[in-house]
């Protein structure tokens, strides 16, 4: 066998290996949307870029180009900052060719920021991972807080695929005569705990709102056990989670209960019930 033939064979083998690697070793594509929330655009940009940076530097994942994301959203008359619904986000992700989408929300608490970040599988529209974090020094520790939160989602914890055996939980908006900022934070914290147990999946917010509207209910007023149970059945949930948050002076008292048909656990911590 001549040297020229050996070179040809070697080149063909290398091309085959590269081709195989492209097929079997493809990165999971992630679309990172702009965060939602009534905060400064500079803060939103920092959160988006820091989350994207962690994804890019995580083996097995790549971030879709911002130009492609903007193009698809514009063509479908969506704005990035308003895309927080899991179903809509997953649908846009499919059009972009993504495997996952990341949606986040930022709530301002005085001079600090509460951040909620969700990783959504575009095929199922289920939240695969969710993390929350809060700054202690305003924008001073914003970058460090976001980096730590994102790394927990992509580096420190293996992403778990939602299965058919996962229990479905309908998470209603908290009730109580309190600022909507606190209600939003409470709901996101509960959602993150539910999603990250590895046993439960949270129903899409759009589905919950749709069923409540069709039955002339508001999520924030769903505190009656029998009503919540009935709405949960219509949604196809295994559990419903309703909460009531009341202000007591300068402190906040959270009265939480998880409702399973006919079973009531009373006022205890969420983790006591679902871990």
Image: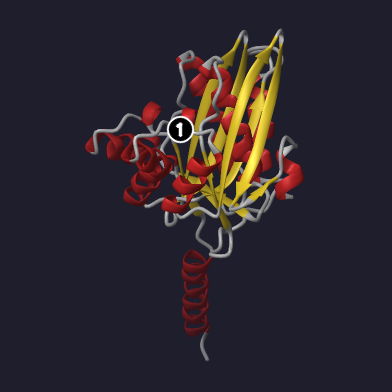
Is 216 or 89 nearer to us in this picture? 216
The reply, left or right, for residue 39 in relation to residue 182 is left
Q: Position of residue 154 (x, y in %)?
A: 63, 45
Mark 1 neighbour density, 10 Å: few (under 14) some (14–19) many (20 or more): some
Estimate the x, y position of residue 55 in percent, counting from the top left. 57, 42
Total numbered labels placed on residues in the image: 1
Q: Is residue 161 above or below residue 179?
A: below
Residue at 51% in and 31% down: 173
Residue 211 at least partly seen: yes
Q: Is residue 106 left or right of residue 268?
A: left
Write down the quadrant of residue 266 in the picture. Answer: top right
Q: Residue at x 51, y 28 (%)?
A: 105
Residue 192 against residue 184 in the figure, above or below: below
Please provide percent x and percent y for residue 32. Answer: 46, 38
- Front residue of 250 and 85: 250
Question: Could you tell whether 109 is left or right of 144 in the image?
Answer: left
* Element type at mark 1: helix
**Can residue 153 be seen here?**
no
| Residue drawn at x 55%, y 40% as measured from the top left | 225
Q: Position of residue 207 (x, y in %)?
A: 39, 45
Residue sitting at the far bottom:
1
Rendered position, 184 above or below 103? above
Quickly name the residue at label 1.
219
By what rule are the colours in the image chosen?
secondary structure
Q: Is residue 61 above or below residue 22?
A: above
Q: Quadrant of residue 137?
A: top right
């Amino acid at each position: 066998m001549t040297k020229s033939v050996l070179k040809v064979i070697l080149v063909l083998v290398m091309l085959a290996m590269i081709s195989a690697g492209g097929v079997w070793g493809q990165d999971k594509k992630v679309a990172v949307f702009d965060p939602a929330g009534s905060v400064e655009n500079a803060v939103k940009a920092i959160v988006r870029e820091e989350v994207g940076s962690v994804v890019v530097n995580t083996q097995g994942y790549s971030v879709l180009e911002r130009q492609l994301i903007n193009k698809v959203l514009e063509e479908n008359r969506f704005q990035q900052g308003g895309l927080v619904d899991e179903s809509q986000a997953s649908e846009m992700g499919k059009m972009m060719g993504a495997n996952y989408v990341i949606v986040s929300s930022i709530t301002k608490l005085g001079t600090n920021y509460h951040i909620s970040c969700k990783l959504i599988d575009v095929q199922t529209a289920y939240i695969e991972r969710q993390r929350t974090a809060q700054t202690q020094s305003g924008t001073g520790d914003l970058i460090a807080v976001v980096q730590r939160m994102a790394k927990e989602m992509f580096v420190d914890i293996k992403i778990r695929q939602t299965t058919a055996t996962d229990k479905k939980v309908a998470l209603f908006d908290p009730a109580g005569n309190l600022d909507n900022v606190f209600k939003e934070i409470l709901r996101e914290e509960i959602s993150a705990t539910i999603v990250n147990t590895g046993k439960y999946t949270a129903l899409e917010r759009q589905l919950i709102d749709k069923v409540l509207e069709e039955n002339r209910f508001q999520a924030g007023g769903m505190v009656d056990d029998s009503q919540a149970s009935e709405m949960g059945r219509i949604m196809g949930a295994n559990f419903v989670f309703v909460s009531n948050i009341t202000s007591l002076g300068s402190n906040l008292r959270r009265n939480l209960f998880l409702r399973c048909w006919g079973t009531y656990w009373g006022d205890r911590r969420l983790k006591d019930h679902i871990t």
